[in-house]
Every structure is written in C-alpha cells, then in structure tokens.
C-alpha cells in the first residue's frame, strides 16, 4: 500500500506573526518557515505505518511556491520516499487545494491519505474533509490513534469535544491528524544528505488541474486582535479573594 | 433576503448550547427565516430546538441511532437541503468542524471557518494564525457555508419559540464508515464549554495526583475544570479538558489558572473570558500579560489557602 501525505509550508509555530501596518496581510519577510506541525505529525505517522510493514511507500505532496521544496526535502529527510510539488505562486483555498490533491490521488492511487487537521496559518480545517468528499471516500478527522483492523479497515480514535471517539473506516480513506497522534522524529544530518538524492517531481497547478472550479473567498482586510486591557498584580491570596468578591465572581 | 439553515448539535439527550450560539449569530443576518436541521433518533429533542425564539422550522431527520451523526452520513442530506438556503451554518465545535467542510465541498464552495463577527449578510470577521490576526472576508456564493466560533456569541436564551417540526428519515447513511465507541471523562462538574467559571491547571501542577487540589478548588466554587496542552500531553488529565487553539475555545465569566505559563496557543482559547486570574511561580510567565489579576506564588500553598478562605 502507498500512503500519500499532504503538507503545507507555513510560518513556524514559534513566530508571533504581526499584521502589516496597511492591513494588507501579515509580515512574512525573513520569517522562519516550517512544515505545518500537524502535517509533520502526518508524515511521522505514515513512516511508522511503513516501518510496521503495513505500507511500502510514503509519498509527500505539497501545493505552494518553489520555496516549498525545502519542506519536501525535510519530509524526505524524515524518511519519505519521494515527493511532489504542485507549484503555484498564488495562495490557494481549501476547495481548490482539495481538487489539486484529488488529481494527485488519481495519479498515485494511494491506499491512505494522511494530512494535518488544519494549517496553522489560515486555521481553516477544511481541506482533508473536502478531499474525502470529492474523492467520495471516508474521513477520520482529528486522529489521536490509527489502528489497522484488517488490511483494508482501520479504527481511528478521534479527539472530540466529549472525549475520544473511535470510528471504523474502510480504506482508501483520508485521515487528519491531531496533536497527540505521535511525536515526530528529529532529522539527522546523514538523512538530509540522503534526501537530496530522493525524487522531487515539480508540476504546475495550471498543467495538472487546468479547470479548477469554485470561487475564492475574498480577504478584504487584516487587523491585529484587540488587546486585553492591562491587569493588576496582587501580593496575597486575601487581596485576590477581595477582588473576586468585588466582581461577584465568588460567594 | 437571507434564508438560514443551522445544523443542530446534541449528545442524544440534550441539545448542545452551540446550537443556540449559532442561532444568536444567525439572527444578526436579519434573515427572512431560520430553520434548524436536527439529526437524531429521538424526536423529543426537536421540541428543545423548537422552543428557541426565531426558529421557523425544525427539520427532524430520524437517524437509526445518534451515531448516524457521522459526517459522511449526514453531509449529503444537509447539502441537499442547503440548496434552498442562502446560509448553511454549523458550530465551530469538533462536530461542526468535521461535517461542515463536507457540506461546503458538496455545494462547491469554500467555507468561512470560525466566524467571530458579522458585518453584513456576506461579510464576516474570522481569526487566523491562532488569533494573532483577524481577517475580514467577503463571499458572494449562492450558499454561504460557515462555522460559527461559539465563544464569540452568547447562547440564545429564549424559550417561547413555536417552530413547526417536520419529520423525515435519513437516507444517505454511508456504509464505509461506522461508529465504534465514545469514551468520555464522565465528570460531575459543569461542562467546560458552557461553564461560567473555569479552574485550570498546567504543567506546573506536576502530576495526575496533584491535579486533585485543582479539582477540589473547582468543586468548592462550582467551576468546570480545564488544562493546558502540556498537562494533557504529560498525561495528568484527559484530552477533553484541553483549552486552546486545538482544544476548546471558551468564554467563562471567570477563568482561573494555576501553573500555566501561557503559550499563545493556550491564550487563543481564553481571550474571550470575562476575568482571567493567573497564579504562577514564575513572575515572567506570559500568562501575566493577559491576566486581569495575577499572583506570583506556589500553587501548592495558594490553593489550600484559598480553600480555607473561600
């Protein structure tokens, strides 16, 4: 079985992004870029499934500009066998990303697609579900455990508001990862060297899917969130309790 | 004029407050009508929704059991109904986040995720970058599919509604996906997402056993309990207690946290709280930048003292 992992290049999660003064976007010049953390978990999970002998190839795909090759190289240094960059210089929204990924699926015929539940830039949390829908296959979102029941059935434990829900899906399926699925491995230097020789295929979005459908949502303006007003520091529990009582928050 | 279809959420016995929050948001569209789709085994849940003022019709879709709320099973029905509406909205809970993008894909539109403010019928504000930036977005598709950030809207408290209830049977059950089990924390404490007071703990609490003093204080003041990602990852508490970007986004009147440093991903989950109280032994912890009241000190001395004095 082949596993396809979809990843996205995003501003590193440690960076506190700033909105540009003219409201046209967030400042990304010179900012550290990384693999979206949820997608890194997706790569790790695919590698573990392969290491257990349940898959024989891990292919990583991304949609983005040419710089996204860096993230694909990192994914291959982690252990992915090869990668595909579907290149575009303009930002692409979830429904269109799902159409591009569906085309890649049709060419690659994976038995399982794993991707992060959301990218930490747009926080949309849509692409995995949309991809499963267009593909007409099951989805298991927010996964914290993937367990093979048979070769073509998996039980996926999902992190939901009420606790942990387990569902069973037939493969092929799309699984989106949550934080506690695994802890991604660190990349070692020899693996970075080895990754340079692994295949990285580049195609243009316009060549792969010339007929993208559906409207993009227009972004009119970016702004910084309203800061909370400055609070007070107290020195003792008595002072704290007085304030809480004053506000009527405790009896 | 706008016509809105809302996807109701419930646990089999009770309609989730997220439904009333989405209703509050939908009312700001000054819509011609608001209908609610309810997928459940038990039609008595429909009367809970029908009692909300402003709902015109409750579309009850009988499902063989509550687990037919699986996204792949219900999304085709919602999308089909949705063609008669201008807005198809669900809550930005794990339930809504799972289902609504499927509905959007079936209707051929991008979804507006996590609406936090309504400007007009097709212009909204939503957070990106874990709330570090807010964008204003506009969309003019025939159907606007969206999830509503529940912490941004108060639950509609009306109970004098008299919506009609229509009944049908779910005909789009997916055979490739099935429910296996749900394991919940089963706490007697108030529900974290709707509680007016929340007490939470972080890595600083140190262990699963130590969390008992956090629970004791919560019980003393009738609060729900929450935790940071670090505390969940360390195995001190179950995942359903996690507050933050990838956990629950909450807006209690009082949020009091012990031993939480205040990573940006955690702050995202609490910034709509009325009063934030932070207790941490590190006076430089970022949590103090957003706290309304801060106290530097050892939680193992402060909690017992609070137990005694409250």
Image (tube, coloured by chain):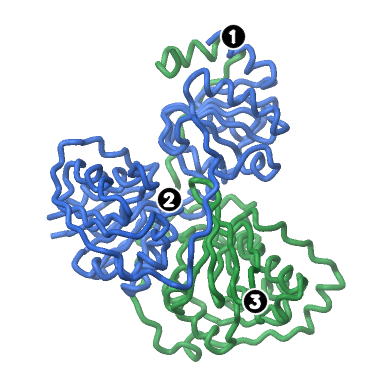
Chain colours: A green, B blue
Secondary structure at numbered mark 1: helix
The C terminus of chain A - image quarter = top left
Give the spatial CA distance, label 3 vs label 1.
58 Å
Q: Chain of mark 2?
A: B
Indicate the position of residue B85 as horizontal and vertical percent values: 20, 64
**Residue occupying the point 47% across, 76% down:** A137
Precedes in sequence: disc 1 or disc 2: 2
Q: From what the image shows, is residue A164 above or below residue A189?
A: above
Q: Quadrant of residue A113?
A: bottom right
Check if mark 1 and mark 2 are on a common chain: yes
Secondary structure at numbered mark 2: loop
Q: Residues within 10 Å of mark 3 (few under 14, many from 20)?
A: few
Indicate the position of residue A3 as horizontal and vertical percent values: 64, 77
Q: Which residue is mark 3?
A: A151
Give the camera-side residue of B263 and A173.
Answer: A173
**Residue occupying the point 43% across, 52% down:** B127
The N terminus of chain A - image quarter = bottom right
Q: From what the image shows, is residue B256 above or below residue B302?
A: below
Marking on residue B308: 1
Q: Chain of mark 3?
A: A
Give the camera-side residue of A70 and B85.
Answer: B85
Q: Residues within 10 Å of mark 1 (few under 14, many from 20)?
A: few
Give the spatial CA distance, label 3 vs label 2.
32 Å
Q: Which residue is mark 2?
A: B93
Can residue A34 be seen in the rendering of this structure? no
């Amino acid at each position: 079985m082949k596993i396809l992992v979809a990843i996205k290049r995003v501003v590193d999660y440690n960076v506190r992004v700033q909105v540009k003064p003219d409201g046209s976007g967030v400042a990304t010049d010179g900012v550290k870029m990384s693999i979206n953390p949820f997608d890194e978990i997706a790569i790790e999970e695919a590698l573990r499934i392969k290491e257990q002998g349940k898959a024989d190839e891990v292919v990583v795909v991304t949609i983005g500009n040419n710089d996204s090759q860096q993230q694909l190289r990192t994914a291959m240094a982690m252990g992915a066998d090869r990668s595909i960059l579907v290149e575009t210089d303009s930002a692409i929204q979830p429904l269109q990303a799902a159409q591009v990924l569906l085309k890649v699926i049709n060419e690659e015929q994976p038995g399982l697609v794993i991707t992060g539940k959301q990218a930490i830039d747009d926080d949309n949390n849509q692409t995995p579900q949309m991809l499963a829908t267009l593909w007409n296959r099951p989805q298991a979102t927010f996964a914290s455990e993937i367990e093979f029941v048979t070769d073509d059935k998996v039980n996926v434990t999902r992190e939901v508001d009420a606790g942990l829900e387990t569902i069973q899906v037939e493969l092929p399926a799309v699984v989106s990862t949550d934080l506690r699925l695994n802890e991604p491995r660190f990349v070692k230097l020899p693996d970075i060297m080895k990754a340079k020789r692994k295949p990285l295929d580049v195609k243009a979005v316009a060549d792969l899917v010339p007929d993208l459908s559906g409207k993009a949502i227009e972004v009119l303006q970016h702004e910084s969130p309203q800061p909370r007003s400055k609070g007070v520091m107290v020195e003792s529990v008595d002072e704290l309790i007085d304030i809480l009582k004053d506000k009527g928050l405790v009896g | 004029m706008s016509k809105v279809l809302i996807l109701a959420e419930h646990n089999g016995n009770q309609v989730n407050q997220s439904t009333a929050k989405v209703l509050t948001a939908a009312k700001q569209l000054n819509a011609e009508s608001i209908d609610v789709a309810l997928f459940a085994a038990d039609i008595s849940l429909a009367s809970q929704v029908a009692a909300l003022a402003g709902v015109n019709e409750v579309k009850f879709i009988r499902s063989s059991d509550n687990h037919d709320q699986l996204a792949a099973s219900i999304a085709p029905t919602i999308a089909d109904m949705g063609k008669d509406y201008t807005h198809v909205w669900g809550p930005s809970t794990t339930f809504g986040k799972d289902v609504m993008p499927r509905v959007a894909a079936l209707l051929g539109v991008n979804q507006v995720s996590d609406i936090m403010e309504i400007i007009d019928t097709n212009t909204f504000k939503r957070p990106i970058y874990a709330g570090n930036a807010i964008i204003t977005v506009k969309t003019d598709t025939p159907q606007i599919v969206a999830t509503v950030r529940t912490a941004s809207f108060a639950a509609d408290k009306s109970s004098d509604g008299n919506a009609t209830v229509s009944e049908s049977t779910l005909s789009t059950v997916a055979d490739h996906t099935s429910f296996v089990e749900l394991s919940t924390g089963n706490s007697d404490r108030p529900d974290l997402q709707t509680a007016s007071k929340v007490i939470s703990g972080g890595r600083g609490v140190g262990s699963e056993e130590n969390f008992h003093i956090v629970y004791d204080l919560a019980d003393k003041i009738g609060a729900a309990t929450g935790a940071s990602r670090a505390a969940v990852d360390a195995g001190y508490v179950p995942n359903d207690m996690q507050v933050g970007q990838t956990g629950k986004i909450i807006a209690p009147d009082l949020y009091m946290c012990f031993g939480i440093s205040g990573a940006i991903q955690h702050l995202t989950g609490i910034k709509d709280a009325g009063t934030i109280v932070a207790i941490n032994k590190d006076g430089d912890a970022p949590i103090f930048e957003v706290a309304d009241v801060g106290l530097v000190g050892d939680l193992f001395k402060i909690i017992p003292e609070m137990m005694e004095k409250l």
